[in-house]
Image: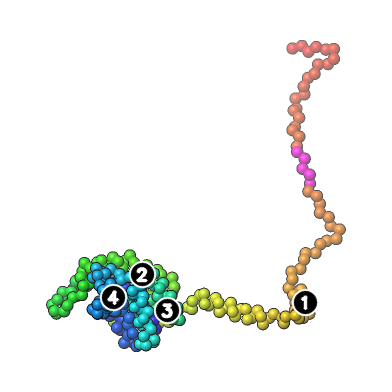
Amino acid sequence: MRIVLLGPPGAGKGTQAKELVSKYGIVQLSTGDMLRAAVAAATPIGLKAKDIMARGGLVPDEVVVGIVSDRIDQPDARNGFILDGFPRTVPQAEALDRMLAKKKLRLDAVIELKVDPDILVRRIETRVEQMKLRGEPLRADDNPEVLKQRLAAYGIQTAPLVTYYKGSGALRTVDGMASISEVAGAIGRALADAAFRPVDKAKAGTKSAAKSGKAASARKPASGKPAGRKSTVSARKKAPAKPKSVKGARRKPAAKVTPRRPAKSSKKSRKPAPGRRLTK
């Protein structure tokens, strides 16, 4: 099973990914963890991403796509994986689709964890306070102000992914504000529903066209041999009958319409009789 988890920072994607790993026996591929490991190891990619991550920005696509592609090829990812934090933009999603197509793979479902950004800021503030009380080191992005910047970046660059995956039919939306167990249950139901989603229409159309082509070739007579008399007769029967014409019937010409003459005046003009003069 190949899954993408969508949601803003602090939505609980990491927690739900661990639940899915134990339930389905697949691996979690967190680009954030991979990039942080690269930063800690001071690799070229890590140094390139260090400043961007500290500001809450997005790492360049070519860096992330290369990391994910190599990770998918590893043996433990053959049975399936969960992508947490990738893709973050529509171009990354398109690059992921192309990459999987080359590997003859496809995503089974995209789960969106829908949450309230204002509540997320309050959550991170609480988490930072708790980590300070326990004496745990804080990450560069464990900061309410940085979180606000990351939420703004998510709204601009990542939210369009919802529309992108909705168009493909892979998107399933879950209320991320519920408890961890309730969210996990909702994700399980969404994945069960995704398992029965319709086959790609383009592929289905190709298969149906191939079947209809086979059926047509089965009905077609062998080349070089005319069709039998029976098929000719049936074809004649199916042909629509021409309307019978009546012998000797002639079409009457249309009646000629003559314009009406204006009515004559009822008053007669008085003409003088020859040799007489009219007096008043």
Instruction: Decide which of tag 4 and tag 2 comes sooner along the chain.
Output: 4
Q: Alpha-carbon distance for marks 1 and 3?
A: 56 Å
Q: How is the image coloured?
A: rainbow
**Circle 3 — which element?**
helix
Q: Alpha-carbon distance for marks 3 and 4?
A: 26 Å
Residue 190 placement (x, y as % from top left): 38, 79
Instruction: Decide which of tag 4 and tag 1 comes sooner along the chain.
Output: 4
Report if residue 219 is visible in the image: yes
Q: Which residue is label 3 attached to?
A: 100
Q: Residue at x 76, y 68 (%)?
A: 241
Q: Amino acid at mark 4?
A: Pro
Q: Amino acid at mark 1?
A: Val
Q: Amino acid at mark 2?
A: Thr
**Circle 1 — which element?**
helix
Of all residues shown, which one is farthest toward the right? 248
Q: Alpha-carbon distance for marks 4 and 2?
A: 23 Å
Q: Residue at x 75, y 80 (%)?
A: 224
Residue 280 placement (x, y as % from top left): 74, 12
Residue extent of the magenta highlight: 255-259
Please give left or right for residue 153 compared with residue 136 in the image: right
Please give left or right for residue 265 compared with residue 195 in the image: right
Image disc number at residue 89: 2
Dot 4 alpha-carbon crowd within 10 angstroms: few under 14, some 14 to 19, many 20 or more: few
Q: Which residue is label 1 attached to?
A: 233
